Image (cartoon, rainbow, N blue to C red):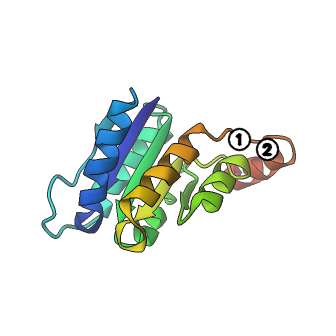
Amino acid sequence: MKIAMASDHAGFNYKEQIKTFLIEKDHEVKDFGTYSAEPCDYPDFIRPAAEAVAEGGFERGIILGGSGNGEAMVANKVAGIRCAVCWDLRSARLSREHNDANMMSLGERMMLIQEALEIVELWLKTPFAGERHKRRIEKIEKR
């Protein structure tokens, strides 16, 4: 799977570890930055990653910050993006099954790295349930 990744400084360490995890599982990953733990403005990195997913260059996107909230807000400003803040396995699974989330936002300050890796793995393998949820997705996408 082709996956876009981005973070701010507060999510940088987990981004690097998740990127390695994904590459080891044979996913193709593009890192949109940031490239260090130096303070930065997350929209500078999150928006290009979200735009790349929305344009179809990537099947999914994973973004990170301290809490993941601001990053999700930026991603969701891009038409065609459905970014869910995932804080546990259940929220990750439901974001895919019910909302067909094409991006996920994680908070490095909110969980241990092992939990983040489990969330990523489940999120990537969970399919969209379709049916009644498809109608709702169409309503989200309507302008």
Marks 2/1 in contact by CB < 8 Å: the verdict is: yes
The residue under the point 44% across, 61% down is 106
The CA span between labels 2 and 1 is 9 Å
Mark sitting earlier along the chain (2/1): 1
Looking at the rendered image, the disc whose residue lies closer to the viewer, 2 or 1, is 1
Left or right: 141 in relation to 117: right
In the rendered view, tell whether residue 37 sits above or below residue 135.
below
Label 1 belongs to which residue? 128
Label 2 belongs to which residue? 134
Left or right: 18 in relation to 123: left
Q: Position of residue 22 (x, y in %)?
A: 37, 37
Q: Position of residue 117 (x, y in %)?
A: 43, 51
Q: Look at the image and tell me whether residue 123 can be seen.
A: yes
- Kindly identify the amino acid type of the residue bearing the numbered disc 2: Lys
The residue under the point 57% across, 46% down is 122
- Kindly identify the amino acid type of the residue bearing the numbered disc 1: Phe
The secondary structure type at the circle numbered 1 is: loop
Q: Position of residue 44 (x, y in %)?
A: 27, 58
The residue under the point 54% across, 62% down is 86
